[in-house]
Image (tube, grey):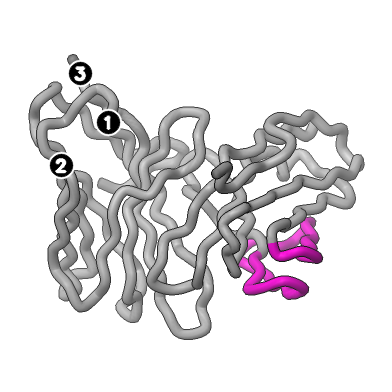
Amino acid sequence: GESVGLHLPTLSVQEGDNSIINCAYSNSASDYFIWYKQESGKGPQFIIDIRSNMDKRQGQRVTVLLNKTVKHLSLQIAATQPGDSAVYFCAENSGGSNYKLTFGKGTLLTVNP
Amino acid sequence: NAGVTQTPKFRVLKTGQSMTLLCAQDMNHEYMYWYRQDPGMGLRLIHYSVGEGTTAKGEVPDGYNVSRLKKQNFLLGLESAAPSQTSVYFCASSYFSQGTEAFFGQGTRLTVV
Protein backbone atom coordinates (compact mmCIF):
# COMPACT_ATOMS: atom_id res chain seq x y z
CA GLY A 1 0.00 0.00 0.00
CA GLU A 2 0.94 3.68 -0.11
CA SER A 3 2.37 5.48 2.89
CA VAL A 4 0.25 8.29 4.27
CA GLY A 5 2.06 11.12 6.03
CA LEU A 6 4.45 9.68 8.60
CA HIS A 7 2.77 6.30 8.73
CA LEU A 8 4.39 3.29 7.14
CA PRO A 9 2.35 0.68 5.34
CA THR A 10 1.93 -2.18 7.78
CA LEU A 11 1.45 -5.91 7.47
CA SER A 12 0.42 -8.02 10.43
CA VAL A 13 0.64 -11.81 10.18
CA GLN A 14 0.44 -14.83 12.46
CA GLU A 15 3.55 -16.82 13.23
CA GLY A 16 3.94 -19.60 10.71
CA ASP A 17 2.00 -17.84 7.96
CA ASN A 18 3.61 -16.69 4.73
CA SER A 19 4.17 -12.94 4.28
CA ILE A 20 4.19 -10.94 1.07
CA ILE A 21 5.60 -7.43 1.06
CA ASN A 22 5.17 -5.34 -2.06
CA CYS A 23 7.13 -2.48 -3.57
CA ALA A 24 6.55 -0.33 -6.63
CA TYR A 25 9.77 1.06 -8.06
CA SER A 26 10.08 4.22 -10.06
CA ASN A 27 12.74 3.90 -12.73
CA SER A 28 12.22 1.58 -15.68
CA ALA A 29 15.98 1.74 -16.30
CA SER A 30 16.80 0.21 -12.91
CA ASP A 31 18.75 -3.00 -13.33
CA TYR A 32 19.40 -4.16 -9.78
CA PHE A 33 17.09 -4.44 -6.79
CA ILE A 34 17.66 -5.23 -3.14
CA TRP A 35 15.50 -5.97 -0.14
CA TYR A 36 16.72 -4.76 3.24
CA LYS A 37 15.44 -5.57 6.72
CA GLN A 38 15.71 -2.97 9.46
CA GLU A 39 15.09 -3.89 13.07
CA SER A 40 14.36 -1.19 15.61
CA GLY A 41 17.47 0.81 16.48
CA LYS A 42 19.65 -0.91 13.90
CA GLY A 43 20.94 -0.26 10.43
CA PRO A 44 19.42 -1.91 7.35
CA GLN A 45 20.57 -5.48 6.69
CA PHE A 46 20.76 -7.12 3.28
CA ILE A 47 18.21 -9.89 2.70
CA ILE A 48 18.22 -10.73 -0.98
CA ASP A 49 18.85 -9.12 -4.34
CA ILE A 50 17.79 -9.63 -7.94
CA ARG A 51 18.99 -8.39 -11.29
CA SER A 52 16.71 -7.16 -14.02
CA ASN A 53 17.43 -10.15 -16.25
CA MET A 54 15.69 -12.39 -13.71
CA ASP A 55 12.08 -12.53 -12.55
CA LYS A 56 12.52 -14.69 -9.47
CA ARG A 57 15.22 -15.48 -6.99
CA GLN A 58 15.07 -17.65 -3.90
CA GLY A 59 17.01 -17.58 -0.69
CA GLN A 60 16.55 -19.22 2.65
CA ARG A 61 12.84 -18.77 3.47
CA VAL A 62 12.70 -15.71 1.20
CA THR A 63 11.78 -15.26 -2.44
CA VAL A 64 11.94 -12.06 -4.47
CA LEU A 65 9.74 -11.62 -7.54
CA LEU A 66 10.33 -8.94 -10.14
CA ASN A 67 7.71 -7.81 -12.65
CA LYS A 68 9.36 -5.28 -14.94
CA THR A 69 6.21 -4.73 -16.96
CA VAL A 70 4.45 -3.04 -14.06
CA LYS A 71 7.63 -2.05 -12.16
CA HIS A 72 6.74 -4.16 -9.16
CA LEU A 73 8.89 -6.04 -6.70
CA SER A 74 7.72 -8.38 -3.96
CA LEU A 75 9.34 -10.18 -1.06
CA GLN A 76 7.84 -13.42 0.13
CA ILE A 77 8.78 -14.76 3.53
CA ALA A 78 7.85 -18.36 4.21
CA ALA A 79 6.80 -19.56 7.68
CA THR A 80 7.13 -16.10 9.19
CA GLN A 81 8.72 -15.99 12.65
CA PRO A 82 8.60 -13.33 15.40
CA GLY A 83 12.22 -12.51 14.57
CA ASP A 84 11.07 -11.39 11.13
CA SER A 85 9.26 -8.42 12.68
CA ALA A 86 10.96 -5.34 11.23
CA VAL A 87 10.67 -2.65 8.59
CA TYR A 88 11.42 -3.93 5.09
CA PHE A 89 12.78 -1.65 2.38
CA CYS A 90 13.17 -2.24 -1.30
CA ALA A 91 15.94 -0.37 -3.10
CA GLU A 92 16.69 0.08 -6.79
CA ASN A 93 19.86 0.94 -8.67
CA SER A 94 19.37 2.47 -12.06
CA GLY A 95 22.89 1.79 -13.26
CA GLY A 96 24.87 3.98 -15.63
CA SER A 97 26.57 6.86 -13.83
CA ASN A 98 23.98 6.82 -11.09
CA TYR A 99 25.83 5.61 -8.04
CA LYS A 100 23.04 5.65 -5.58
CA LEU A 101 20.46 3.19 -4.36
CA THR A 102 16.99 4.70 -4.24
CA PHE A 103 14.99 3.39 -1.30
CA GLY A 104 11.27 2.93 -0.91
CA LYS A 105 9.54 4.21 2.21
CA GLY A 106 9.37 0.79 3.84
CA THR A 107 6.74 -1.61 5.16
CA LEU A 108 6.40 -2.54 8.82
CA LEU A 109 5.92 -6.28 9.31
CA THR A 110 4.55 -7.42 12.65
CA VAL A 111 4.47 -11.13 13.43
CA ASN A 112 2.03 -12.17 16.11
CA PRO A 113 2.94 -15.28 18.14
CA ASN B 1 35.50 -8.14 11.12
CA ALA B 2 33.71 -4.99 12.32
CA GLY B 3 32.13 -4.03 8.97
CA VAL B 4 30.90 -0.43 9.04
CA THR B 5 31.33 1.49 12.29
CA GLN B 6 29.79 4.88 13.01
CA THR B 7 30.86 7.31 15.74
CA PRO B 8 29.10 8.64 17.80
CA LYS B 9 25.87 6.66 18.24
CA PHE B 10 23.94 9.55 19.80
CA ARG B 11 24.43 13.29 19.92
CA VAL B 12 22.47 16.36 20.94
CA LEU B 13 23.51 19.69 19.41
CA LYS B 14 22.35 23.22 19.88
CA THR B 15 21.32 25.18 16.80
CA GLY B 16 24.38 26.67 15.18
CA GLN B 17 26.89 24.20 16.63
CA SER B 18 29.08 22.11 14.39
CA MET B 19 30.03 18.46 14.52
CA THR B 20 31.57 15.66 12.50
CA LEU B 21 30.23 12.14 12.16
CA LEU B 22 32.84 9.49 11.48
CA CYS B 23 32.32 6.35 9.41
CA ALA B 24 34.94 3.63 9.19
CA GLN B 25 34.82 0.42 7.14
CA ASP B 26 37.29 -2.45 7.18
CA MET B 27 36.09 -4.26 4.04
CA ASN B 28 38.30 -2.37 1.56
CA HIS B 29 35.19 -1.03 -0.18
CA GLU B 30 35.60 1.63 -2.86
CA TYR B 31 32.21 3.28 -2.43
CA MET B 32 30.89 4.95 0.69
CA TYR B 33 27.62 6.76 1.34
CA TRP B 34 25.89 8.91 3.92
CA TYR B 35 22.10 8.63 4.24
CA ARG B 36 19.61 10.25 6.54
CA GLN B 37 16.45 8.51 7.68
CA ASP B 38 13.36 10.42 8.73
CA PRO B 39 9.94 9.00 9.67
CA GLY B 40 7.92 8.13 6.59
CA MET B 41 10.71 9.26 4.25
CA GLY B 42 12.83 6.14 3.87
CA LEU B 43 16.56 6.62 3.39
CA ARG B 44 17.78 9.63 1.44
CA LEU B 45 21.30 9.99 0.10
CA ILE B 46 23.22 13.04 1.38
CA HIS B 47 26.67 12.58 -0.17
CA TYR B 48 28.68 9.71 -1.52
CA SER B 49 32.24 8.86 -2.53
CA VAL B 50 33.46 6.61 -5.30
CA GLY B 51 37.00 6.40 -3.97
CA GLU B 52 39.65 7.98 -1.79
CA GLY B 53 39.85 11.71 -2.36
CA THR B 54 36.52 11.96 -4.19
CA THR B 55 33.09 13.12 -3.03
CA ALA B 56 29.81 13.93 -4.74
CA LYS B 57 26.39 15.29 -3.85
CA GLY B 58 23.42 13.06 -3.36
CA GLU B 59 19.74 13.83 -3.09
CA VAL B 60 19.79 16.12 -0.01
CA PRO B 61 23.31 17.63 0.31
CA ASP B 62 22.50 21.13 1.60
CA GLY B 63 23.91 21.91 5.04
CA TYR B 64 26.40 19.03 4.97
CA ASN B 65 29.99 18.55 3.85
CA VAL B 66 32.01 15.38 3.52
CA SER B 67 35.60 14.27 3.16
CA ARG B 68 37.26 10.99 2.15
CA LEU B 69 40.95 11.46 2.90
CA LYS B 70 41.47 7.76 3.54
CA LYS B 71 39.78 4.89 1.74
CA GLN B 72 38.44 3.41 4.94
CA ASN B 73 36.97 6.62 6.39
CA PHE B 74 34.13 8.88 5.29
CA LEU B 75 33.37 11.96 7.40
CA LEU B 76 30.10 13.90 7.44
CA GLY B 77 30.23 17.45 8.75
CA LEU B 78 27.54 19.83 9.87
CA GLU B 79 28.99 23.34 9.98
CA SER B 80 25.97 25.06 11.55
CA ALA B 81 23.37 22.60 12.77
CA ALA B 82 19.67 23.32 12.29
CA PRO B 83 16.62 21.61 13.84
CA SER B 84 15.75 20.29 10.35
CA GLN B 85 18.89 18.16 10.56
CA THR B 86 17.47 16.17 13.45
CA SER B 87 17.51 12.67 12.01
CA VAL B 88 19.13 9.27 12.11
CA TYR B 89 22.24 9.15 9.94
CA PHE B 90 23.50 5.98 8.32
CA CYS B 91 26.79 5.35 6.65
CA ALA B 92 27.13 2.56 4.11
CA SER B 93 29.82 1.09 1.89
CA SER B 94 29.95 -1.21 -1.13
CA TYR B 95 32.52 -2.78 -3.45
CA PHE B 96 31.00 -1.14 -6.50
CA SER B 97 28.06 1.11 -7.10
CA GLN B 98 26.08 -1.29 -9.21
CA GLY B 99 25.11 -4.85 -8.76
CA THR B 100 26.30 -5.23 -5.22
CA GLU B 101 24.62 -4.56 -1.94
CA ALA B 102 25.60 -1.78 0.43
CA PHE B 103 26.56 -2.63 4.01
CA PHE B 104 25.22 -0.26 6.64
CA GLY B 105 26.46 0.97 9.98
CA GLN B 106 24.29 1.03 13.09
CA GLY B 107 23.34 4.68 12.74
CA THR B 108 23.84 7.96 14.59
CA ARG B 109 20.82 9.56 16.19
CA LEU B 110 21.28 13.33 16.06
CA THR B 111 18.98 15.81 17.76
CA VAL B 112 19.36 19.53 17.14
CA VAL B 113 17.59 21.71 19.69
Q: Which residue is pictured at 73% across the width and 75% down the height?
A: B54
Picture residue at 56% right of the left edge, 57% below the top: B27
**CB under 8 Å between callouts 2 and 1?**
no
Q: Earlier in the sequence, mark 2 or mark 1?
A: 2
Q: What stretch of residues is rendered in magenta? A: B48-71
Secondary element under disc 3, as helix, strand or loop, is strand
Say which amino acid is labelled 2.
Answer: Arg
Q: Earlier in the sequence, mark 3 or mark 2?
A: 2
**Residue occupying the point 21% across, 45% down:** A21
The dot on residue A61 is 2
Expressed as whole percent of the image width and height from the top left, the position of residue A107 reads 32, 41
Q: Residues within 10 Å of mark 2 (few under 14, many from 20)?
A: few
Cα–Cα span, label 3 and label 1? 10 Å
Judge left or right: residue A105 versus residue B45. left
Chain name for mark 3: A
Using the image as rendered, state which of residue B45 and residue B102 is in the foreground.
B102
Disc 2 secondary structure class? loop
Label 1: how many Cα within 10 Å (few below 14, some 14–19, many 20+): some
Reading the image, the residue beneath label 3 is: A112
User: Viewer-nearest of labels 3 and 2?
Assistant: 2
The question of residue B67 being in magenta is answered with yes
